[in-house]
Image: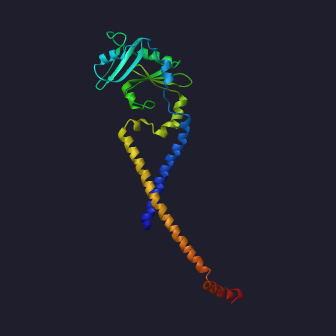
Amino acid sequence: MKKGVNYLFSIHRITGCIIAGFFLMWFVTGLILIYHPYPRLTDEQLYEKKEILPSLLPDIQSIKQKAGENIKQLHIRQSQGQTLATVTTADSCFTYCCNDTTVAVKPITFSFLEETALKWVNAPVIKVDTLHERVQWILYSRYDRAMPIYKFYFDDPEKHELFISGKTGEVQQLTDKSQRLWAWLGAIPHKFYLPFIRKNLDLWDTSITIGGLLCFITSLTGAFVGIYVLLKRHKQKKMGNSLSQTLVSPTSYNRTFVWLIPYRLGY
């Protein structure tokens, strides 16, 4: 019985220390996260840099006729002087020019991406990477539809990094040195925004399951340890009260007095 209790105490200490470490991390990173959130583009930034749509746009009925089936999503934008409509249906997704359906959509060239990048950051480009999978700063699954993504590195004091879709020509993410530093100290550990976890759903589910199991074991052993200690203290308290009553009883007091008199008299 005693070995089993000691074993439960050890389990509770070990799992409790692990969970306490996570709670400490969440507390510190949560404070940072309040003032420095994970980098993301705001709607104001996107609308400010987008090309302005013309005042005359096609009506919805003409777009429905072009789609030929139920439309799940419709995205109209201005790109390279063309008004483009991206139609998403249950089975397909296509883009065409609203101004003139006979005109082909201009291809996304690297020179156009460079022009777009310089509109966002007024600094020399020192390097460009071509990404075919999600990396840090673009971890959401929606970025898969924008692949390939070009990552532009800028030679400016803020060390900006810009992510542009090679498929649509739209900017996906913009970060600077300060944002990346605070994200590594706050949002990334707090939310486990790590590519090897976020890209692998099975690993993410396993991590959540293990974490939940640790919390359950800690709670279960903690409840047993608490009840065990409470009962033990109650038993010790009863024994202590019984012992104190025995020490102050007349019989025990007389016996003590009898033994102390010869000692004091030197016998």
Residue 182 vs 75, above or below: the answer is below
Q: How is the image coloured?
A: rainbow
Which residue occupies the extreme bottom position in the image? 267
Residue in view at x 48 percent, y 29 percent: 40
Quarter occupied by residue 196 = top left
Res 147 seen here: no
How far across and how far down the image is residue 224, in percent?
A: 45, 61
In the image shown, does 170 or 223 lie closer to the viewer?
223
Q: Quick one: quadrant of the N terminus?
A: bottom left
Residue in view at x 48 percent, y 53 percent: 16
How far across and how far down the image is residue 115, in percent?
A: 46, 15
In the image shown, does 29 or 234 lie closer to the viewer?
234
How far across and how far down the image is residue 23, in percent?
A: 51, 47
Q: Quick one: quadrant of the C terminus?
A: bottom right
Residue in view at x 53 percent, y 29 percent: 177
Residue in view at x 38 percent, y 31 percent: 141
Query: How many marks are shown on the rendered structure?
Result: 0
Q: With 77 as the anchor, is 48 left or right in this view?
A: right
Q: With 246 as the anchor, is 141 left or right in this view?
A: left
In the image shown, does 193 or 253 lie closer to the viewer?
253
How far across and how far down the image is residue 105, in percent?
A: 35, 13
Residue 94 vs 4, above or below: the answer is above
Res 149 seen here: yes
Quarter occupied by residue 238 = bottom right
